[in-house]
Image: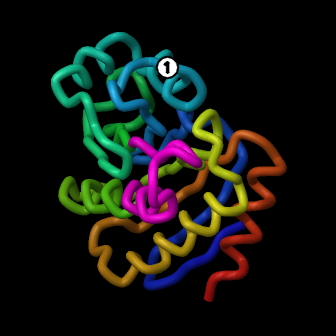
Amino acid sequence: MEKKTYGIKIECIQGDIASQTGIDAIVNAANAQLRIGGGVAGAIHRAAGPGLEQECRPLAPIRPGEAVITGAHNLPNKYVIHCLGPVYGRDKPEDRLLSSCYRNALKLAEQNEIRSVAFPAISAGAFGYPIEDAANVAIKTIMEILPDLRNVAIIRFVLFNTSDLEVFNSALSSMK
């Protein structure tokens, strides 16, 4: 699904966040130490190579809702924006912390004159955030930020499986 608002294209696709060619920056659903980990963080670190972890070391630790930016190393992108999403049921308030991830990532994108950003479903994997709630927070936050964006022209949500893609498509189609 694709929607264009304020001249910015928002799209949802199924795929691998670590193989997004033609996208300036991908977002890592990171852990606090910005290490390899599992899920999205593992896929990104494995594809980027050991240089990514070395660059991340002095930036860690980060807190839920925070974002930092690094180079992309062996990835087909220029940057990786690392966000620590909330652990559902532990980090409170979950919705505000998750929203901060998207806000802070897009703030870094603007500061670095990034034209295109690809997001995974932050916190919806191992951190246990229910996918429907995560999608609604993500899409609502993006829609609130759109009027303030000057550099970003493409926002892509990259979902690993079909059911997550359907949830994000539904959330996107319901937004005005």
Name the residue at the bottom extreme. Answer: 176
Tell me the quarter of the picture where residue 108 sits. bottom left
Can residue 129 be seen at all in this image of the molecule? yes
User: How far across and how far down the image is residue 123, in percent?
Assistant: 56, 45
User: How far across and how far down the image is residue 98, in percent?
Assistant: 47, 57
Give whichever of 141, 48 is nearer the camera.
141
Secondary structure beneath label 1: loop
Give the magenta part as a residue range. Answer: 84-101
Q: Which residue is mark 1?
A: 37
The answer to whether 15 is drawn above or below residue 2 in the figure is above
User: How far across and how far down the image is residue 84, in percent?
Assistant: 40, 42
Q: How many marks?
A: 1
- For residue 157, side relative to residue 7 (left or right): right
User: How far across and how far down the image is residue 65, in percent?
Assistant: 36, 52
Give whichever of 24, 122 is nearer the camera.
122
Q: Quadrant of the N terminus?
A: bottom right
Residue at screen point 46% across, 74% down: 8
Residue type marked 1:
Gly
Residue at screen point 35% across, 26% down: 34
Residue at screen point 37% across, 60% down: 100
Is 86 magenta? The answer is yes
Can residue 120 be seen at all in this image of the molecule? no
- For residue 164, side relative to residue 37 (left or right): right
Q: Quadrant of the C terminus?
A: bottom right
The answer to whether 154 is drawn above or below residue 38 in the figure is below
| Colour style of the rendered protein structure | rainbow
Is 90 magenta? The answer is yes
